[in-house]
Amino acid sequence: MNKRIRLGLACSLLGLLIPLVGCGKSAPQAGTDTATENASEPLVASHSTTVDEPETQASDPAVPPVDPKPETPKPSDLVATPDERESGSGRPLPSPPDMSPDQNNANAQTTTADAGPEPAAPEDDLPQWEPEGPTAEEIARKAFQPPPGAKQLSATGRLWIDPKRQRVIIDGYVALKRGALEMFACPVGTKEHESIVAALARSREVHAALLAVDATPGTPVRFRPEFAPPTGQVIRVWVCWYDANDEFHVVDAREWVQDLQTEKAMTAEWVFAGSGFWQDEETKQEHYMADSGDMICVSNFSSAMLDVAIPSSADADSLRFVPFETKIPDRDTPVRLFLVPMPNPADAPSPSNPADQVELPSARDVPRAQ
C-alpha cells in the first residue's frame, strides 16, 4: 500500500517537471528570433517597460556619449564668443578681465582690461610748469625804483601811498592795445584780455590805499528798479612810462580810452564807487568783489572799485569805449599809475592849490632802475 502511494506521488511530480523543462529550453530561441526580426526593421521608439536603459555602443556616431557627471563650467566658458564655441574645444578661450592670462596659452591676447591701469607717476617726477621769461613784477622792478617819499603797502605787489601829496602809486604794464574794452586797469592774472593795463596789486589793497589818503567811497551802479550811476569821490588817474629812447611820458589815463560816440578821448570821470563784498555760503568767508578784475572800469559794474559816472553798457554789442591804439605804447611796456583824489565840489579849494590845477607826476616820481 505504501509502495503504491509513493509511486503515485513520483508520477505526479514527474508530470509537473516535464513542461517546465521544455519552456526553459525554448526561451532563448524565441529571444533570438525576436532580435533578428527587430534588426531588419528601422529603429523606432521603444515602448518597453524595462527600467534599465539600453547600452549604447561607443562607436555609434548618431548618439554622443553621455557623461554621467557633467563638469562645472569654467570662468572662461562664460565669456567665450560664438566663433570660439563653434571652433571646437581645442581653441583656447580668452581670460576674463579679472583673471590673469594663461601663460601656457600662446594664442591668448592681453587686453587693456587684462593689463590693468599703469601706476601713477610719483608727484616729484611730474613735469612742473614754469613761466617763460621774467614775471611782470620782475620786469617792473628792473624798470623803476620805488617812488621817493612813498610808503609801500603790499609785500608782494608794487603798491605805495604818498600821504603828504595824497597819492596812490601802482606799477604795471600795458596788456591791451586793440579789442573789446571793459576796464582801464585790472589786477595781474584776471582780465588782461579786456583791460589796457595790468596792475601789480589787488583791488582790495588799492581800495585800502585810497582810504589811507582820505578818499571818500560812494555807491556802485544800480540797474534796478531803474538805472542809478555810481557815486563817490572823483579819482584822477595818471600814466607814466619811458619810451625806447628813454624819454619820460605822463598823460591823463583817459587819453588812452577812445569814446566811440565822439571818436575822441574819454571825458567821463572815474569815481570811487567802492565795490562790495560777497560771502561764500559754505565757508562763510567774505570776498572783495573787485578782486576778480574790476579795478578801474569803463563799463558799469556793480563790483567796480572805480567806475565811470555815466551810463556805459557792458554788453559786447554795445560797448562805448575802445583802446585809443595810436596813443598807447607797445604791449608789455612797464608803466606807473598815480591815483589822485580830486577835491569834492563842496570842499573849499586851497588858495595855494586850486581845484583846476593838479600837480602832475614827474620823472623824479618814476626813477629808472640802476
Image (cartoon, grey):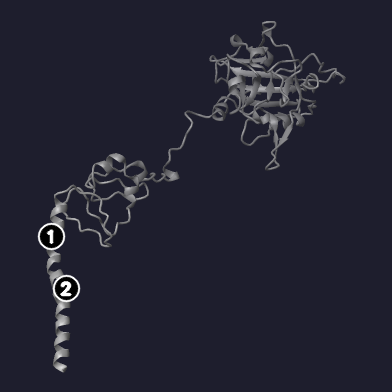
Q: Could you say where residue 334 lies in the image, as x and y percent from the top left?
A: 58, 22
Q: Which residue is mark 2?
A: 20
Near mark 1 (Cα within 10 A), the count class, few <14, some 14-19 or many ≥20, is few
Which is more toward the observer, 43 or 153? 43
Q: Could you say where residue 18 lies in the image, as x and y percent from the top left?
A: 13, 75
Q: Which residue is mark 1?
A: 32
Q: Say whether residue 150 is visible.
A: no
Which is more toward the observer, 284 or 219? 284
Name the residue type under label 2: Leu
Near mark 2 (Cα within 10 A), the count class, few <14, some 14-19 or many ≥20, is few
| Outermost residue toward the top in this view | 262
Residue shown at 25%/55% (left/top)?
66
Is 85 located above or below residue 266 in the figure?
below
Label 2 element class: helix
Q: Which disc number belongs to residue 98?
A: none
Which is more toward the observer, 80 or 55? 55
Quadrant location of the C terminus in the rendered image: top right
